[in-house]
Image (cartoon, rainbow, N blue to C red):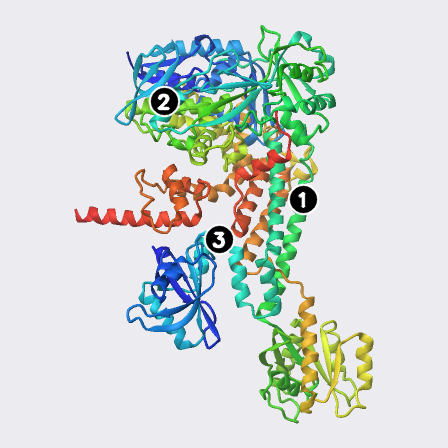
Amino acid sequence: MKFDVIVVGGGHAGIEASYIAGKRGLRTLLITSHLDLIGQMSCNPAIGGIAKGNIVREIDALGGAMAKITDVAGIHFKMLNQTKGMAVWGNRAQADKKTYRTLARKVLESQPMIFLLQGLVVGIVSEGGRASAVMMDSGEEIQATSVVLAMGTFLNGVAHIGLTSFPCGRLGEPPSKYLTESLTELGVQSGRLKTGTSPRIDGRTVDHQKMSVQHGDAKPWPFSFSSERPPENRSVCWITKSSSETHKIILSNLDRSPLYTGKIKSRGPRYCPSIEDKVVRFGERDGHTLFLEPEGLDTNEMYLNGLSTSLPFDVQVLLVHSVPGLERAEVTRPGYGIEYDFFPPTQLWPTLESKVLKNLFFAGQINGTSGYEEAAAQGLIAGINAAEKILGGELLVLGRETSYIGVLIDDLVTKGTQEPYRMFTSRAEHRLVLRQDDADERLMPIAYQKGLISKEVFDARKRVWNLKTEYKRRLFDEKISPENWNNGASASSVIRTKTQASQLLKRPEVGIDDILSAIGEEIEDREVRLGVEADIKYSGFVEKEKERLEQFRRMENEAIPETFEYQSLQGLLAESKAKLSQIRPRSLGQALRIPGVTPADISVVMMYLSKQKHVSRETTVNQ
Amino acid sequence: MESTRTIAALSSAAGVGAIAVIRLSGPQAFSIVEKCIDSGRAFRDSPARHVKLYRFICPSSGKPVDQITAVKFFGPNSFTGEDMVELFCHGGEIVVEKVLSVLIGEGAYPARRGEFARRGFCNNKFDLMHAEAFLGMIESRSGKEYESSLEALMGTSAGRLVGWRERVKALLRDVDASIEFPEEDDVRKSSSRYIERIVEIRKEIEMEVEARGKSHIIEKGIIIPIVGVANAGKSSLFNMLVGYERSIVHWQEGTTRDGVGEEVHIGGERVTILDTAGLRDTDDPVEKLGIRKTIEYVSKAAQVIWVTPANSPMTHIEESLILEKAMGKIAVVISKKDLAEGAEKAEMCGEKKIPFIRSCLIDKGARDALVDFVAEVVKSRIGSLETSSLIRTKRHEIIAKRIIEELKGGEKAVAEGEEILAASLRRVLADFGELVGDTTNEDILDSIFSRFCIGK
């Protein structure tokens, strides 16, 4: 049995990796411990959010599956931050978990070159410095040219509920053993992280009178740039708060908390703390907000977002009952903390290929990230590059200035991570040029050129871009006269002379609709209308950032050869040498981002680089 | 590469002194000195920061050169961050030259100007502000300059700078938190007062930049014109303060037509004393020009000394040109022939709270009292000038002005949107980075998580 690409793990990373490899016509095998749980959402039933929604759009622009599945499986859509500028909008959907799984599997099965296999991978077989096969628990070897690892929290997973702990990959599923040991033997280093999830409750036992309802948007936005029909809201979420009683219960039970008794030693995410952490670190405040999210349409089960905990089950029941509206709620599944192996991602190239073993790719939570979207993004890039290794094309590395995916992977391989890594818009230094609405314009040209999206999809989007360009030109050419404008305009936006429509639109208090009605124009498509507005409104600020952006690009383009020898460099501290040799940055820009490497170090490297260039030029002349 | 070279230089002032300090820094600092010491092993075995007496020899001839003490510093715990030796020899010029030439003969390179400090900076031993502070300390020529450098060196003023940066960081933290976590109650409550907070920081920095203008004056030394009617004794006072006859003293009125200036140290401060043309009605065009210049000096100067004869009434020219224009920055020398004279003028000064002295300028014995009087005047004047210990160099000034402009942009950006404001604040932090070190996006996130309870 031989495959082009083997993907280990059927979570969000594994789905994207196998999907894109299969789409490119490569014989691809997805191995998972449970075929019916492909695309399981292990934690909350939501896709997207601030920054994360942007990643989903980027995945779609690059030919991935997540956006399309979400548009159909979603039952509650909300574009967050709509009161702020479009650069920081983020779409979020509550998804029906079962539908999501069904669709994910269907998407994979629709590809003739993708094959599925239920089983446990226990080892990686290498040959001549490259991965050549995976070893199954049956002892059988399955050969492949490229291997993508995406095992999530399954590796040596240990769940904690109170002071009880037991091996587990996800509640109710066995962990994956031996694989970490196999990788360690090959020279890959591993570490340990912690994450957690909340109890689920029976929706029939909830008193909605004591909660406020959260509806989706009146007109939901799709995630995919080529979704066939608009997404629909089919359910609602509920908002409540913890009480002073919750606070008391937690404080009086800390001696039974695995977090506070020191039983859990690994680091968990600060942005998603357990309720124990929130209460201990921030006190009661006036209650901590909690969200009730439907797990699906044909189940009553609800996810209690904000109440992640690893306290004992009996305490969890008390906690739930202390929340207004949940006094009589039945817990269907306990929350739990989970510790698992990860592989510090500084051991990877920005292509997500291992520096230790060629043709071996790592994606998702095993790289120290958290979140479905972050996992999917890595799976996609790993899959693209695992395929590219076979097809012989150039491997794909996205820049920090072109995508959140670029920021994500660059952060991981350059800085590593101490806690489960989640994307935030503020991680991107060029946030204003990474809007969720123009991810297609940023990435589709690359995707099309690499054969990741079809001509039809690309052409359809090109028509949208052309339309936007046309309208922008019109607003640039069109002048608005005071007579047409001042009537009804607010005091601050009054004009005295004929003013360019686009110039007027740049004023903070003026919106695109004001402009369109003044010039007697209409743009029916909401996406085009708001895209045009954002492009014009941001143009001045983007111009202001241009210098910084160009400086950034210059440093990114100063390539450092992969074989560059730091040890022999004079003038570098031993510590800097060690860091540079470990990360082996591909550019001076990346080198500067390595924690602890100083600008002085970089100037030394720069000098040697220019010297080398000089020497190689001379040798060429001599030949 | 240069920093693998071991460098050596005389670190104390050139010239004759009881002892001289020679410094070596670099990977071979220990081995070079070891070779030049009679009992090299004693030096080799000596622990860090121990002072010991050695015989310094010329290794090739074995001849003794001097008796020295030496201290080892192991990198990175040294000024440069490299292995270092501080060597104390006798302070004669010949001795120093011999010791240095032996060290260089054994492989040390003569250090270039500022090279020790540069290595320390490159090895992250201190930041640029700090390096500038101790350079300022070494080069300060006025007490005020010394004080502001000291403040910077001890970190008290850097603390204020860091304080501004921290406040911008806190602001960005609130803005970013509001962008990242729109559904968190905890965050929503604190995302306010953006404009007031920016304006507050901007105004403080503006005040500091203004003060920089004044410290600039002090760095150059303040200029004190001596003014008065013709023949009041200005040049006599000038010569007395300067210590020798520089101005031509002549009883004919109008001797000093242009200003004559001299830099002197009085009361520990560097000042330039300016002798000026006497004020009187004249038709002489050259003299007229001189008088116009004097008036200009009076209006520009931070301190003015007015010499007025005790035995003649105040002229209208003194009244209008000196008393009026220089009020608040004037000190008076009432030149008198004997004790009885000048009582009215002294009374007038007393009333107006103007510092004055009655002095017989031609009497050599009056000199000490006069110099003390002027020193006191200079001291209290400089003390009253508000200076900036933060913004001490042109570089600081340029960056501070950039920050002020960017903060003004930030005030406008509040209306344009939080993401625009955030971009503006990031640029401010990048500018602060040039002064006191960088702020990374990681720092902002850390700050968000420690300030807000996040956790949907």
To the question of a shared chain for discs 3 and 2, the answer is: no
Identify which amino acid the numbered label 3 is placed on: Lys
Q: Chain of mark 3?
A: B
Q: Residue furthest top?
A: A298
Say which residue label 2 marks. A182
Viewer-nearest residue: A225 or A216? A216
Pointer 1: what residue? B197
Is A220 on the left or on the right of A136, as rendered?
A: right
Q: Residues within 10 Å of mark 3 (few under 14, many from 20)?
A: some
Name the residue: 47% across, 43% down: A548
Q: Are marks 3 and 2 in contact (CB under 8 Å)?
A: no
| In the foreground, B181 or B49 | B49
Residue A114 x/y as whole percent: 36, 12
- Residue neighbourhood size for the residue with mark 2, other residues' Cα within 10 Å, grouped as few (<14), some (14–19), many (≥20): some
Front tag of 1 and 3: 3
Query: CA gap, disc 2 to disc 1?
Result: 56 Å
- Please indicate whether residue A90 sits to the left or right of residue B354 in the image: left
Q: Is residue A256 above or below residue B251?
A: above
